[in-house]
Image (spheres, rainbow, N blue to C red):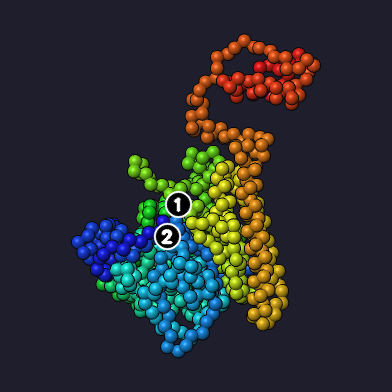
C-alpha cells in the first residue's frame, strides 16, 4: 500500500541520488543529516511510494478519425482512489487565493468543499488542510479528474506516469520546500488552459516558481505527462531542481503522424533549443547540467541521459513495455534487449505507425501481456494450467528474482483514453476502472456535466454493488477460478458493451443537440448514464454466470475440464501413485437384458466402484458393453 512515514528530520534540500554511478560520473553528496542514504530515502518526511503507470499518445494524422489520442493506466498499489470526478467551472473574486494540498493518492485522496460533490466530507471525515496557497485566476474551467486531471471542457487531456530522476524532494510540511505535485500541476493545467501548449508552459512555469515534488522514492522523484488537445500532443517531463525549491522540465511535440510511449522512464533525448515549435523547456535544463559537469556548451543535450536515473524496480521494467506497445502499434524489428536504457537509446521518442489507430487499438495496448511473443505471460508454469498472466506482488526472504512487467496489470486502479476532437459533441474520455483485462471502457463527453453514478463510488475497502470499480474487480477475481475459459466470457461482454459505447458516441455526435449548453449537457448526461448503468448491471451478473459454468472444475456440470497435458507433465503428475495391481476380470450382471448398457446401467456400475481405484473403475464403466451386453468392472 501507499504508506508515508513522517520521521522527525529537519527540512531537506532536493536529494542528489546515490543509487548508482551514472555513466561514469560520481554522484555529488547529498545532505543526509547523519543517516545512510537508503534509510533517509525510506524514512524522510512525507515520502510517497512511486506508482508505476503506462502512457500512450497518438497524433491526429496517426488516428483513424483525425482525433488526438492519449492514455494513462494508473497502476497503483493498494488503497488507491478509483473515482472519476467532475469539477465544475467557477468564477473567483479578485485577489482570491487557490489552496494547494499535499497529494497522498490514497483513498480518499481529497476531502473538502470547493471541488464539486465528489469530495464533500462524509460524517466523521475532517476536511484536508492546505499546505500553501497561490494566487487564483478570475475563472477556472470545468474538468474531470481521476487523482490526476484527465480532461477539461475545452478538450485538453492528460495522462501521467511516474519516472526516476537524479533529483528528488518532498513537500512543504513533509520535510521539503516544494509546493506542487504532478497531481496538482495537472489540475492547475485543467483549470487554467485551453490548449496543450498553454498547459505545458503553465505547468512548467508554476513548477519553477513554487517548487515541484515527485512521488518521493529515488525511483519516483520525477514525472511525465502526455498533454494533448484536438490539434497536438506533447511528452512533458519534470523533476525537482537541486535546491528543492524549483523545477527542471522539458517537453517534446509528437509529430502529427506519430505515436509515443512513456512507461516510468524519461524518453526525450536531444533537445533542439532553436526549435520552439517542437521543444519547450526551462532555462535551467542547460545551466544545471553545465554546473554539474554533465553537459558542455556546444554539445547535444540528451535530457534522458542527463536527468533520468534509469529504469526502476528492475531491468526491462520500462523498456519491455515500450517494446510491447510499439509492437502493438505495428512497429516491428525494435530490439528487445539492451544494456542500460538510460544511455542506450534503442527505442524512438516517437515513431510513425504503419496504419492509423482507433480508440479500440489503445484499449488493446493497455490489455497486452505480450501474447504471441517469447515473453507471453499466459504461457509457462507461472501462468498455471489456465493461462493466467498476472503475477501477484511477491516478497520472498529466500528467493530473489523478478516477474516480467506487462502493460496489462492486475493492480491497475483506472485507465483512461482521451479522444481529443472538435467534431460532433467534441472531446471525450473513455474510462475504465480496475484492471484493463476485466474492465469496460465507457464514454464521457467533455461537454457533459456529470459523471455516471457508478464511477463516483470506489472505496477499495468496502464492496459496493453501486460501484463499477467493484463490479470489474469482482469479475476479475472470480474469473481466476478458470482464467483462460472464464475470460472468454468476460471478453464477450466487454467487447459487446465497448462496441455499444462506440455506437453511442457516433449517434450522439450526429445529433444536432440544442445550442444551449445546459440543454445539450442534460441530453449527454442522460445518455451516458443509461449506458453506464447497462454496463454495471451486465458485469454484476457475470460472476454468477462464471461460477455456474466453471464451478468445481466442470463445464456446466457436464464435462470435466481437467488439466492440460503440458502442465500435468510439468508438475509431475506422471510420478503420482501408480494404478493398482491387475486383477482377474470380474463380470457383474448390471442388467438381465442383452446390450442394455444405458445411462442407468452405467450409473449402477459407477456406484458399485470401490473408493480405492475409483477413477479407473469409473472410466471402465463408461467404455460400454462387452460382446454379451454386460458391463465389465
Instruction: Report whether 184 appears left or right of 536.
Output: left
The residue that appears at 46% across and 70% down in the rendered structure is: 111
Q: Which mark is residue 405?
A: 1
Farthest residue in the right direction?
Answer: 593
- Say what secondary structure mark 1 lies in: loop
Q: Is residue 138 above or below residue 126?
A: below
Farthest residue in the top direction?
Answer: 584
- Say what secondary structure mark 2 lies in: loop
Residue 248, position in %: x, y? 35, 72
Q: Is residue 409 above or below residue 88?
A: above
Mark closer to the observer (1, 2): 2
Quadrant of the image containing the C terminus? top right
| Distance from the alpha carbon under mark 1 to that under mark 2 | 13 Å
Q: Which mark is residue 51?
A: 2
Towards the viewer: 246 or 536: 536
Towards the viewer: 486 or 600: 600
Instruction: Report whether 249 appears left or right of 472.
Output: left
Farthest residue in the front direction?
Answer: 123
Towards the viewer: 216 or 375: 216
Whether residue 342 is visible: no
Q: Is residue 403 above or below residue 180?
A: above
Amino acid at each position: 500500500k501507499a504508506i508515508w512515514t513522517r520521521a522527525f528530520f529537519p527540512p531537506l534540500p532536493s536529494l542528489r541520488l546515490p543509487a548508482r554511478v551514472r555513466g561514469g560520473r560520481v554522484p555529488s553528496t547529498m545532505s543526509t543529516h547523519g543517516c545512510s542514504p537508503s534509510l533517509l530515502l525510506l524514512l524522510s518526511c512525507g515520502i510517497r511510494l512511486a506508482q508505476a503507470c503506462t502512457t500512450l499518445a497518438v497524433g491526429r494524422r496517426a488516428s483513424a478519425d483525425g482525433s488526438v489520442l492519449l492514455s494513462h493506466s494508473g497502476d497503483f498499489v493498494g488503497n488507491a482512489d478509483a473515482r472519476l470526478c467532475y469539477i465544475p467551472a467557477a468564477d473567483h473574486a479578485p485577489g482570491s487565493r487557490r489552496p494547494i494540498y499535499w497529494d497522498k493518492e490514497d483513498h480518499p485522496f481529497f476531502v473538502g468543499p470547493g471541488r464539486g460533490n465528489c469530495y464533500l466530507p462524509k460524517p466523521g471525515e475532517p476536511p484536508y488542510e492546505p499546505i500553501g496557497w497561490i494566487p487564483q485566476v478570475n475563472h477556472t474551467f470545468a474538468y474531470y479528474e481521476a487523482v490526476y486531471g484527465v480532461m477539461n471542457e475545452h478538450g485538453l487531456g492528460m495522462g501521467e506516469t511516474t519516472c526516476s530522476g537524479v533529483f528528488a524532494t518532498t513537500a512543504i510540511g513533509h520535510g521539503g520546500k516544494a509546493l506542487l505535485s504532478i497531481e496538482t500541476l495537472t489540475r492547475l493545467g485543467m483549470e487554467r488552459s485551453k490548449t496543450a501548449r498553454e498547459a505545458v508552459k503553465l505547468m512548467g512555469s508554476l513548477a519553477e516558481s513554487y517548487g515541484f515534488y515527485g512521488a518521493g522514492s529515488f525511483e519516483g522523484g520525477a514525472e511525465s505527462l502526455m498533454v494533448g488537445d484536438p490539434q497536438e500532443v506533447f511528452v512533458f517531463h519534470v523533476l525537482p531542481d537541486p535546491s528543492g525549491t524549483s523545477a527542471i522540465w522539458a517537453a517534446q511535440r509528437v509529430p502529427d503522424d506519430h505515436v509515443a510511449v512513456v512507461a516510468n522512464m524519461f524518453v526525450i533525448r536531444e533537445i533542439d533549443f532553436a526549435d520552439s515549435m517542437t521543444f519547450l523547456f526551462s532555462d535551467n535544463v542547460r545551466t544545471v547540467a553545465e554546473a554539474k559537469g554533465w553537459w558542455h556548451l556546444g554539445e547535444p543535450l540528451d535530457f534522458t541521459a542527463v536527468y533520468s536515473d534509469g529504469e526502476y524496480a528492475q531491468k526491462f521494467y520500462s523498456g519491455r513495455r515500450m517494446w510491447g506497445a510499439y509492437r502493438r502499434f505495428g512497429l516491428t524489428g525494435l530490439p528487445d534487449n539492451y544494456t542500460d536504457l538510460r544511455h542506450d537509446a534503442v527505442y524512438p521518442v516517437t515513431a510513425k505507425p504503419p496504419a492509423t489507430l482507433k480508440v479500440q487499438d489503445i484499449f488493446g495496448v493497455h490489455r497486452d501481456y505480450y501474447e504471441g511473443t517469447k515473453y507471453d505471460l499466459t504461457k509457462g508454469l507461472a501462468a498455471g494450467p489456465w493461462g493466467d498472466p498476472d503475477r501477484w506482488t511477491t516478497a520472498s526472504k529466500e528467493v530473489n528474482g523478478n516477474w516480467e512487467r506487462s502493460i496489462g496489470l492486475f493492480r491497475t486502479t483506472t485507465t483512461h483514453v482521451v479522444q481529443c476532437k472538435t467534431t460532433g459533441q467534441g472531446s471525450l474520455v473513455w474510462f475504465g476502472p480496475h484492471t484493463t483485462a476485466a474492465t469496460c471502457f465507457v464514454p464521457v463527453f467533455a461537454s457533459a456535466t456529470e459523471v455516471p453514478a457508478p464511477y463516483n463510488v470506489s472505496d477499495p475497502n468496502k464492496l459496493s454493488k453501486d460501484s463499477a470499480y467493484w463490479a470489474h474487480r469482482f469479475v476479475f477475481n472470480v474469473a481466476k477460478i478458470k482464467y483462460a475459459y472464464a475470460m472468454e466470457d468476460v471478453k464477450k461482454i466487454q467487447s459487446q458493451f465497448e462496441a455499444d459505447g462506440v455506437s453511442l458516441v457516433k449517434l450522439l455526435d450526429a445529433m444536432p443537440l440544442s445550442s444551449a449548453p445546459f440543454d445539450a449537457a442534460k441530453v449527454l448526461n442522460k445518455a451516458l448514464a443509461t449506458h453506464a448503468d447497462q454496463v454495471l448491471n451486465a458485469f454484476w451478473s457475470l460472476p454468477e454466470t462464471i461460477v455456474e459454468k466453471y464451478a468445481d472444475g466442470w463445464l456446466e456440470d457436464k464435462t470435466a475440464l481437467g488439466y492440460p497435458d503440458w502442465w500435468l507433465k510439468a508438475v509431475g503428475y506422471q510420478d503420482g501413485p501408480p494404478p493398482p495391481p491387475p486383477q482377474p476380470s470380474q463380470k457383474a450382471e448390471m442388467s438381465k437384458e442383452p446390450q442394455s448398457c444405458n445411462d442407468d446401467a452405467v450409473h449402477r456400475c459407477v456406484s458399485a466402484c470401490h473408493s480405492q481405484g475409483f477413477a479407473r473403475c469409473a472410466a471402465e464403466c463408461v467404455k460400454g458393453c462387452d460382446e454379451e451386453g454386460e458391463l465389465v468392472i
